[in-house]
Each structure stands twice: as C-alpha cells, then as structure tokens.
Amino acid sequence: MFLLIAEAAGFHESFASLTEGSTFYPLALQLQHHPWNGLRFWDLIQPFFMFIVGVAMPFSFKKRLEKGGRKELNKHIAMRCLKLFLFGVLLHCIYSHGPVWELWNVLVQLAFTILIAYAVMGKSTKFQIGFTIFLLLLTEVLYRIYNPEAPYAQGHETFGAWVDLLVMGKVNDGYWAFINFLPTATHTIWGVVCGQLLQNSRATSSKLKTFLFWGVLATVTGFTLDFFDITPIVKRIATTSFTLASGGISILALALFYWIIDVKGYRKKWLQIFAVIGTNSIFIYLFAETFGHLIFREFDILWNTGLFHNLDAYKDWLLVLESLLILLFLWYITYYLDKRKIYFKV
C-alpha cells in the first residue's frame, strides 16, 4: 500500500525521468510494469494486495461470525464486494474525466476474487488448493482454445481481449484483461489457506516449513513454465505461470515477515510507518488515486509555467522532491486517522 500511494503521488514516474540513462534507471524500471513477457517488482504489488486480503479473511470473518452469524457475514461480503466493484468503476470514470464502463481496476478484480475465495473457504485445505489448480487449468484451456496458434501473443487476439469486447465493447491499450480475476482468485484463495494455517495451533516451525514448501513449489513451477516456453510469464493477462510465480513469492514474503515479526519478535517502531497505512488501506488507495494524482498534475503545471519556469533545469529533481512531499502528506493522513482510531471499513 505504501508503494501504491507512492506511485499515485508521482514518485515512480518522476524517479524514472530523473534516472533515465543512468545506472539507477534499471532500479526505476522495477517500479514499472513489464511491457509483456517478464517479471518486475512492480508486477508483484497486485498479487501481494490480493493475497494479503485473503490472509486477513479468516481472522476478520471469525469475529463477525461470533457477533452476527453466517447470515450477517453473507450480507457483509455481498456489500463489501459491491462497494469494491463500484469504487473500481468510479476510479476509471475519474481517470477518463467522464462516465465509462471499464472493469480493469484492481478493486474490481478484488471484488470478484473475494467472492470466489469466500465461496470455497469453508471447504477443506485440499479442496481449496485443488480448486485453484482447476482455475489455472481452466485459464490455460480458454486461452489455448481461443487462439491455438499464439494464445499469449502480445496484442488483442487473446481470450482476455475477446472477453473485454464482449463485456465492455472495448479493449485496453495496455493489454490488461478483465478476466484476470479468474486466475488471480488463486492469490486470494492461497491467502485464505495461509490465514487459516496461521490460526491453526500447529507449531510455528511446522507453519514455516509449509509456507516455504508451497512458496518454493509455486514459484519454481511458474518460472519453469516460462523458461521452457510452455506458458510465458505475462502479468497483463495474468497467465498461469505469472499467477504461480507471483503467488509463490507472496507466500514466501509472508513466511519471511511471519518469521521476523511473529517468531523472532522484531517489532520496531519504524514498522509503524507502514502499519498505519494498512489500517485504512482502501480509503488511502482511493484518496491517493484521486487527489494524489490531481495534486501531482497541478504542481507539474507550475514547474512548466509561471513562477517556477526559471527552475526548469532542475525540474526532474524538483518533481521527485514534490512526489515525496505528496507521499508524506498522504502518509500523514493515515497516521492522523490511526492515532485517533478512525478507520474506514469497506
């Protein structure tokens, strides 16, 4: 979430402009999505987001079941997913400065993956894992049947693009696909399974071994499929190899922080810098994607015209500084809300 609001504040864009042609530019590229076949750090952010939502579900739902029962929980899930869906659609309208019907936003994707994960989270662990394998195999079959010659070629001749035309009457210029929620529901379901394991009374060493085994297995399988040209790693259409690799890395990341924070007890104050953002994650994401972008654009105009035009030679440095100040402002909002125990729930 911290990196997501940093991007909304304009840091990723301004940092790339500042470092272009320098030895730091490869680092800046890691904060941008890969154009097609490959994996960059920024491609892991959405999987992390969907995965950690799944991890949290068993904990939050346990409390809700104790308070209101299954009927109230069903109502909560339905309303939560509807809100996420509407927020996602609304963001596209804001991006386009007018009403549009576009379903590529991460919140829209999350609305569907939560529903799917919730539908199977009452089943056994074997069933849940088996269901994710089914989703991945289904994705492979659909893409390969639609375009047997080049199922994952870059362009608009994929199954994902066909679904977009069917549902929205348009395709995405960046090749993002609405049907991505089908394979990436795996991320949320795996998160649920990991959350249920964390709730389990098993020894911490056993939990860590389980995380490491499945994390390594999924990651290696994903990269193997890509290495042998079976299925390329493509984040934009969420291929099965991408879903496996990114999902596996998500599990390994959880194992790492579980070991550091929960097992070893490393709970330093500086970690609160990130924790306060998580307490109002959806709110700050929406705020950053609207007002964060707006503030950055308005200040960008100032650097090109008027009083600050004389500083044009330092523009790249100034834009980086500006984005960091906006990031600080967005972070302080979450800090302020957390200190006063004000939490916006979805």
Image (cartoon, rainbow, N blue to C red):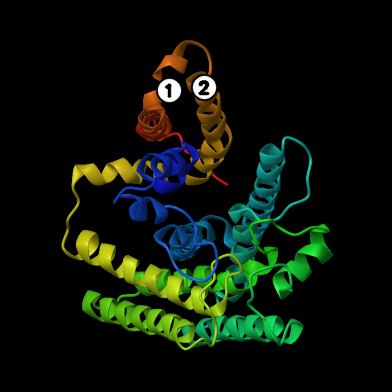
Task: Report whether 344 appears left or right of 102.
Answer: left
Task: Report whether 334 appears left or right of 98.
Answer: left
Check residue 304 in the rendering and tell me which mark sits there, or answer none.
2
Where residue 249 appears, as percent x and y from the top left, is 38, 71
The reply to whether dot 2 and dot 1 touch (C-beta < 8 Å) is: yes
Secondary element under disc 2, as helix, strand or loop, is helix
Image-quadrant location for residue 215: bottom left
| Residue 280 visible (yes or no) | no
Q: The residue under label 2 is which amino acid type?
A: Asn
Where residue 208 appears, as percent x and y from the top left, is 27, 76
Q: Is residue 114 above or below residue 212?
A: above
Residue at 57%, 29% in the rendered image: 294
Where residue 173 appears, as percent x and y from the top left, is 68, 56
Q: Nearer the viewer, residue 193 or 8?
A: 8
Q: Is residue 112 above or below residue 153?
A: above
Secondary element under disc 1, as helix, strand or loop, is helix
Check residue 312 in the rendering and tell me which mark sits there, or answer none.
1
Circle 1 Cα neighbour tier, 10 Å, few/some/many (<14 / 14–19 / ≥20): few
Q: The residue under label 1 is which amino acid type?
A: Asp
| Residue 122 visible (yes or no) | yes
Q: State the separation of the CA atoms marked 2 and 1.
A: 7 Å
